[in-house]
Image: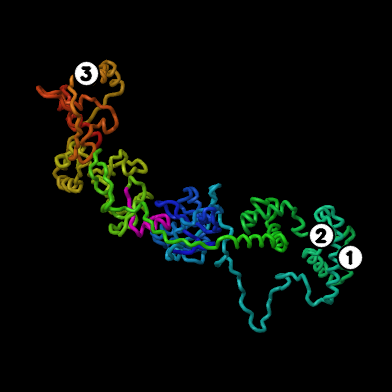
Amino acid sequence: MSFFFLSDYVYFENSSSNPYLIRRIEELNKTANGNVEAKVVCFYRRRDISSTLIVLADKHAREMEEEMENPEMVDLPEKQKHQLRHRELFLSRQLESLPATHIRGKCSVTLLNETESLKSYLEREDFFFYSLVYDPQQKTLLADKGEIRVGNRYQADITDLLKEGEDDGRDQSKLETKVWEAFNPLVDKQIDQFLVVARSVGTFARALDCSSSVRQPSLHMSAAAASRDITLFHAMDTLHKNVYDISKAISALVPQGGPVLCRDEMEEWSASEANLFEEALEKYGKDFTDIQQDFLPWKSLTSIIEYYYMWKTTDRYVQQKRLKAAEAESKLKQVYIPNYNKPNPNQINVNNVKPGVVNGTGVQAQNAGAGRACESCYTTQSYQWYSWGPPNMQCRLCASCWTYWKKYGGLKMPTRLDGERPGPNRNNLSPHGVPVRNSGSPKFAMKTRQAFYLHTTKLTRIARRLCRDILRPWHAARHPYLPINSAAIKAECTARLPEASENPLLLKQVVRKPLEAVLRYLESHPCPPKPDPAKSLSSSLNNLTPAKFTPVINNGSPTILGKRSYEQHNGMDGNMKKRLLMPSRGTKPKLAAQWEIIPNKSPINSRWIHASSEKEEDELD
């Protein structure tokens, strides 16, 4: 059981199999039906953004490393680099509302600080960092403007302390500009009288200005505007420039062209611009760069910042502050969420295994996950297992790695979904390293990412000929599920090589005929028309007596190739005559077993078959 407060960073669960969402609580609101909803700021993981933006994030990280001149990231092991990517988040301006009952715990998120050690993020549990801002709508990444300026780059260069009696050789007039003399010949009363004259001149100047008379139509509004700091700063600056001679300073306030009008940002901005600023401040806070880009692009950044600090002195700011305080009092400040103890649907219960389908029958299948190692840490023992990844891959995680996956959105080590890595043999691989189907699904458990070219070595090609009696290539081609002891064949080949070098093998040279000769032969020997398979099929079926079809299960065949013909396995319509036995004498006709195929009665020269097979092997080698 835990209490969660405003501004807390928390885990939200929106899916039983996906990692937690990381959010910051901004508001807690009670709905009409009594439930509590949390208005949160969204943080995104690396797995949530596109690969193009990940490249930009990596480039930004390398630039930061070069600026910091910190080789720590280079010295980190690959495993820690992999885990450090799970701690990186991307801030966003997006807000969403989620049920408070989906909160699963607290975490900590900080802005990446160059003074912090990178290993410190890995050493602390539930600790994350961010340095970039992600826009889900625009699909962009930007550097956070709220960077904390700490480190060597932002430190002042302090000169050595002067000894007692040592003279400072620097020219003070070049280091600073004096704008007011504290020990001047005037007394405070004279200065106050001059400031009153300056305010009066400012009020008169506003009366003469047409734009000011529209903005301040009454006399007291003009007098209030003339009493602002901009008028007093101008008056004191004028007095300092005239060496504190009041008569000369008054003459400077009213030159020959008319009184000087001094206006600050509060007077320069119109009412519509002020409303835009308040709307932008409500959306972006004190992010003045975004306020300028999205709401007030015609204003300079200096003007916006100056207006903000003047706006804070107005009654408008005080009223809004009171309204927000009253709203905050009526809203919830904390919420109590009990511990979530419901079982996860991804838990693997060994005692409750559903019956599988083996070769199309309802035979009890062996538990595909039994004995499998954890996909992350390779352990085979855990008090609880969880199914992870695509269902057809049948991967699982131990309890520790499952917690890591839910919190950090990745595995402790790379997995085959991210790229192959060394590890124990997987149970879904055949002795040849080919993925084997674990169910009746016609899809393979894995797919290669790209095509590959198998280039055999010279020793392998020689072993195929020297050890033909051991290899038995024709038998191996017809039984692809049987393992081949390649090590024993290579060892036997090495032993036979000295004798074979004395009697080299004579290879038959294949002379290929030109294409013109092949075309002339095809024209002179056209292919005879094939009989209609539908008619032959109907005639064969009419000669049969109806019989009960009993399914035949080939329990002894290790793979599906042993019980189906090549045409059936590839989804092609084969000759149905091959699947039917001719009716015996005195007995009823029956269906042939699926693995029994009627031999072709047409005479075929077996010697020719043997010779052509040898030629094909020569070409393949």
Residue farthest to the top, as pictured = 524
Q: Earlier in the sequence, mark 3 or mark 1?
A: 1
Image marks 3 and 1: residues in contact by CB distance under 8 Å? no
Mark with earlier residue (2, 1): 2
**Secondary structure found at label 2:** helix
Report the residue marked by disc 3: 539
Quadrant for the C terminus in the image: top left
Amino acid on which the number 1 mark rests in the picture: Ser
Could you tell me residue 66's position as x and y percent?
51, 60
Which quadrant, please, contains the N terminus?
Answer: bottom left
- Quadrant in which residue 228 is drawn: bottom right
Q: Could one spot residue 408 in this view of the protein?
A: yes
| Image-based side of 113 in relation to 587, left or right | right
Callouts 2 and 1 close, C-beta under 8 Å: no
**Label number found at residue 452:** none
Residues at marks 3 and 1, CA–CA distance in whole angstroms: 126 Å
Query: Label 3 neighbourhood size at 10 Å, few (<14), some (14-19), many (20+)?
Result: few
Front-lying residue, 114 or 619: 114
Residue, disc 2: 221
Location of mark 1 (residue): 251
Residue sitting at the far bottom: 164
Which stretch appears magenta?
394-413
Give the mark toward the camera: 3 or 1.
3
Q: Is residue 149 magenta?
A: no
Amino acid of disc 2: Met
